[in-house]
Amino acid sequence: MNNTSGKHIALISVHGDPAMEIGKEEAGGQNVYVRQVGEALAEQGWYVDMFTRKTSVEHPKVVEHSSRCRTIRLTAGPESFIPRQEIFGYCSEFLEKLLKFQEQENIKYSLVHTNYWLSAWVGMAWKKRQSIKQVHTYHSLGSVKYKSVATIPMIAGTRLGVEKAVLETAERVVATSPQEKENMRSLVSRKGKIEIIPCGTDMRRFSSFNRYAARQQLGFNIEDKVILYVGRFDQRKGIETLVRAVSRSQLRGKTNLKLIIAGGSRCGKTDGRERDRIERLVVELGIKEFTSFPGSLSGDLLPAHYAAADVCVVPSYYEPFGLVAIEAMASGTPVVASKVGGLQYTVLPEETGLLVPPKNDLTLAAAINSILTNPEWKHQLGFRARARVENKFTWERVAYRLNNLYTDLLRDSVKTLEPASA
Ligand code: UDP
């Protein structure tokens, strides 16, 4: 074993590949979180290996992000995309491959940070085989999600059981907002240790454009009223409520209205079905003429869209944190969001945007309209939104907090091994 032992940590994200281009099949906030946290922790001196399931024969097995941070793709089940509700059956194979990798590389990880319930299961099974500390981030809680969607998958019972067990047994569970902590306590278990560490965003990336430069780059007119949605195509994202809101008369009557629904992939499976459904609805509601679906946005295009927008809408039915809201805010764009989950923590009503009840297109339309019709207020909201993100939600802050948490947990484990002093 080399002299870096004790500084080796594993992040597990079975279904969200941190090296994956965002916007592809089901890739979203979790992929961004794991990658950003991994890279930021490496900068703090940790050796970070991020384990994920290999979903394509063409993907390299190992991707080096820096000298201390890499993504390792393990073969568990077919090397192809599988929807997340079908992955559980491959989790024990995933763990075997991980343990084999650890042995081959002669590394001993001292701590594992698991992401989403599938990885939680792997982390708990790992703890039964080896002494290792577990930190867990849920990214989504089954007990909340199942209340907000129409169809409940077969795997729901298993998921709920794993989510309860990990809260009760992990050394620490990270809640990304006070609302998520409250949900864990009221719906999952009164036992277990929770620490609130919010998600972050890349200020440099999302403040790189001003509105005029962004509009010029994207070919938008300065008079355009731009409403932006960014995210995955998933029923719980509430895109249906947004398109219904935009079809309401007070918004529809506006000239130069542009609705941009960004994200998702054409070749997707579950993603593609929801996208097709929304595209059909846009036609039915008669708003096709001013609605566009640019697909997944990456590189400069994503910050340019946020900066060019008059308002970014996050109409989710459930959102544990919601990175899109803070990315838009970092870009100086006000956010109209559903009053659910972590959005109640990031978006301050009347200060950085507006909060509205979920699934209510009438109220959503009124909120969007109030911002579009008052450019001066829009500007003030956007200015305060950026300041809020700068002060509270950067990846550097997240890594600093996680670094302290890991250090404390590992110090505790050393203490328990030391003989009690006389
Ligand atoms: N995203 C992106 N390009 C897209 C759509 C989404 O890069 O076209 C990113 C977005 O910037 C954000 C993440 O995907 O960082 C979505 O995270 P969020 O927490 O909002 O939603 P989740 O996917 O976790 O439900």
Image: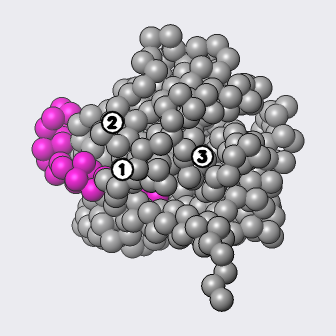
Q: Position of residue 374 (x, y in %)?
A: 31, 63
Could you tell me which secondary element the residue under label 1 belongs to?
helix
Q: Nearer the viewer, residue 130 or 308?
A: 130
Q: Earlier in the sequence, mark 3 or mark 1?
A: 1
- Numbered label tally: 3
Q: Position of residue 102 (x, y in %)?
A: 56, 34
Instruction: State how far apart marks 3 and 1 are (Cα).
Output: 18 Å
Q: Earlier in the sequence, mark 2 or mark 1?
A: 1
Residue at image x 78%, y 38%? 150
Q: Which residue is mark 2?
A: 65
Amino acid type of disc 2?
His
Task: Specify whether residue 196 is in view.
Answer: no
Q: Please indicate whether residue 353 sits to the left or right of residue 305 in the image.
A: right
Compared to 367, does 124 lie above or below?
A: above
Amino acid type of disc 3?
Asn
Looking at mark 2, is its residue's CB closer than 8 Å to ligand 1? Answer: no
Residue at image x 49%, y 66%? 407
Residue at the limit of the structure toward the top, as seen here: 57
Residue 106 within the magenta-colored segment of the rendering: no
Q: Position of residue 159 (x, y in %)?
A: 79, 42
Mark 2 and mark 1 residues within 8 Å of each other at the beta carbon? yes
Residue 213 within the magenta-colored segment of the rendering: yes
